């Protein structure tokens, strides 16, 4: 190969975008850079056309179905460890695959946070037979559930979403607990299915 051909290949390699990926919370690919900005050790990621700055995350999946049938006691879906770092906003996003064995029974979801003076709000998207409902609930150690009384469209699973923001001044919280129960105590069985997941993002 001529010197000109080698030079052309070198230029093509430098110009061609290289993709970096986040797998299981780890950054892979040749274009990855780490920087110590302040005391955080944040990660600087270069993708094909996009630059990003933040903490890489990975999804945590529910490995087996969780059921609740009493209508009087909550069943935990996820216990999510929080980062106790002053000055860092935290976001938790969850997709819950849920169903009921009785078309006339609703599912009530709940989020509670540990620690005094916790600061945060969760928005729940509840699926029902008429319209999707959005419920905003302030996070406390005794937060109420969605009080959902409208039933699901059928007994087939649906995805119900939870989006929580936890304030940067919150240094007392250690866990965010997502749980659920049946609307009524008539023996109906409600299920959160394997494959449900959450992401925890720290800014």
Image (tube, grey):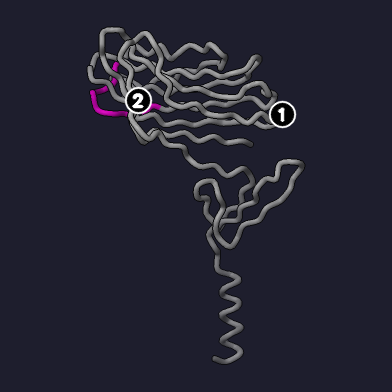
Q: Residue furthest front?
A: 64
Neighbourhood count class around disc 1 (C-alpha, 10 Å): few under 14, some 14–19, many 20 upward: few
Q: Residue furthest right?
A: 38
Identify which residue, 128 or 98, lies in the foreground: 98
As drawn, the label of residue 57 is none
Q: Residue at x 61, y 48 (%)?
A: 52
Q: Which percent across, then down, holds residue 48?
A: 55, 59
> Which of marks 2 and 1 precedes in the sequence?
2
Q: Residue at x 45, y 13 (%)?
A: 145
Q: Which residue is mark 2?
A: 66
Identify which residue, 30 or 132, lies in the foreground: 30
Q: Is residue 76 magenta?
A: no
Residue 200 lies left or right of residue 89; in this view the side is left
As drawn, the label of residue 86 is 1
Q: Is residue 153 magenta?
A: yes
Q: Residue furthest bottom?
A: 2
Snapshot quadrant of residue 13 = bottom right
Could you tell me if the residues under marks 1 and 2 are in contact, i.e. CB atoms within 8 Å? Answer: no
Which type of secondary structure does the marked residue at label 2 adopt?
A: strand
Which type of secondary structure does the marked residue at label 1 adopt?
A: loop
Q: Is residue 121 above or below residue 27?
A: above
């Amino acid at each position: 190969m001529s010197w000109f051909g080698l030079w052309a290949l070198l230029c093509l390699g430098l110009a061609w975008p290289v993709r970096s990926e986040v797998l299981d919370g780890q950054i892979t690919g040749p274009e990855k850079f780490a920087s110590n900005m302040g005391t955080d050790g944040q990660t600087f990621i270069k993708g094909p056309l996009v630059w990003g700055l933040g903490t890489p995350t990975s999804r945590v999946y529910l490995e087996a179905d969780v059921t609740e049938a009493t209508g009087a006691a909550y069943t935990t879906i996820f216990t999510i460890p929080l980062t106790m770092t002053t000055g860092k906003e935290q976001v938790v996003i969850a997709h819950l695959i849920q169903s009921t064995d009785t078309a006339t029974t609703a599912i009530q979801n709940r989020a509670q946070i540990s620690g005094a003076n916790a600061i945060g709000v969760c928005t729940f998207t509840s699926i029902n037979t008429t319209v999707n409902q959005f419920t905003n609930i302030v996070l406390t150690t005794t937060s109420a559930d969605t009080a959902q009384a409208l039933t699901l469209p059928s007994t087939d699973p649906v995805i119900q979403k939870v989006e929580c923001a936890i304030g940067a001044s919150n240094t007392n919280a250690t866990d965010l607990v997502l749980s659920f129960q049946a609307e009524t105590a008539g023996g109906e069985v409600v299920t959160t299915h394997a494959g449900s997941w959450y992401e925890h993002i720290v800014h």
